[in-house]
Image (cartoon, rainbow, N blue to C red):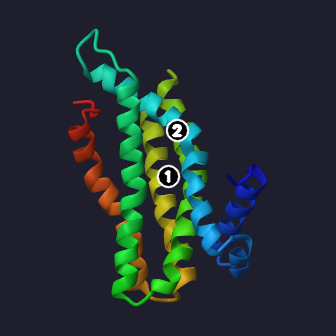
Amino acid sequence: MPSYAEVRFYVSGIWLLIKGDEQGFKQLDLTDRGLLRSFWAFVWCLPAMFVTWAWWRMMFLQAMPPGTKTGGLFFFRLGMLEAIDWILPLILVGIVCALFGLGQKFPTMVIVVNWLSVPFAYAYAVLAAAFILPVGMTGFLALLHLSLLVAVVVALTRVMRMLCGPQPLLVTALVMVLIVPDMLLSEMLQRFLGVYPS
């Protein structure tokens, strides 16, 4: 499992890519081993996910009849949902890469997307914690949530542009398959798994 220092080094490399600096590639392990190790990002995101799940559980219970309880199965299902949301976009990116003859760039895309997930997972966790606490700024927090989504789109767009060059249609397609399916399928999967606050 990559150490904190390694993860910080990788994330700082991605930050350079977002700023348009190709030196960021030198701070990423782009080998086959680096590709496999990048999936440790999911484990690094788990503490942040637990905070987000606690917020989701709170919303779920508020929408349910009094006395409703949730146990380990509830969090197991949330974990399944997170895993699907993590893997499915990468599969779709692989399909886009195959269609456009970019198979050689797919491993790098996976590495970048995996490590990019870490800082955003913790940003969302901070926001979720703010929703849990009785701070009374729901409207402002909702605006921050929207701002985070915009930041994700901007970060992915800039990184994909660094990988693919000035190809707006291709970059747009890659960003869309990383974000839109997750947004469309999340509610359906939440309802199917019984963790949606109806």
Measured along the vertical axis of the image, is residue 166 above or below residue 64?
below
Identify the residue at image location x=49%, y=72%. Answer: 157
Image disc number at residue 127: 2
Kind of residue sitting beneath label 1: Leu
Query: Callout 1 environment at 10 Å: few (<14), some (14 to 19), or many (20+)?
Result: some
Identify the residue at image location x=65%, y=75%. Answer: 31
Kind of residue sitting beneath label 2: Leu
The location of residue 177, given as percent across then percent down, is 35, 68
Identify the residue at image location x=49%, y=45%. Answer: 144
Q: Is residue 176 visible?
A: no
User: Which residue is tagged 1?
Assistant: 148
Identify the residue at image location x=21%, y=30%. Answer: 198
Would you say 194 lies left or right of 1 here? left
The location of residue 44, given as percent across then percent down, is 61, 47
User: 144 or 109: nearer the eye?
Assistant: 109
The location of residue 179, given as percent across then percent down, is 38, 62
The location of residue 10, given as percent across then percent down, is 69, 63
Q: CA distance from mark 1 to mark 2?
A: 9 Å
User: 141 or 79: nearer the eye?
Assistant: 79
Of labels 1 and 2, earlier in sequence is 2
Q: Are marks 1 and 2 in contact (CB under 8 Å)?
A: yes
Would you say 99 lies left or right of 150 here? left
Label 1: element kind? helix
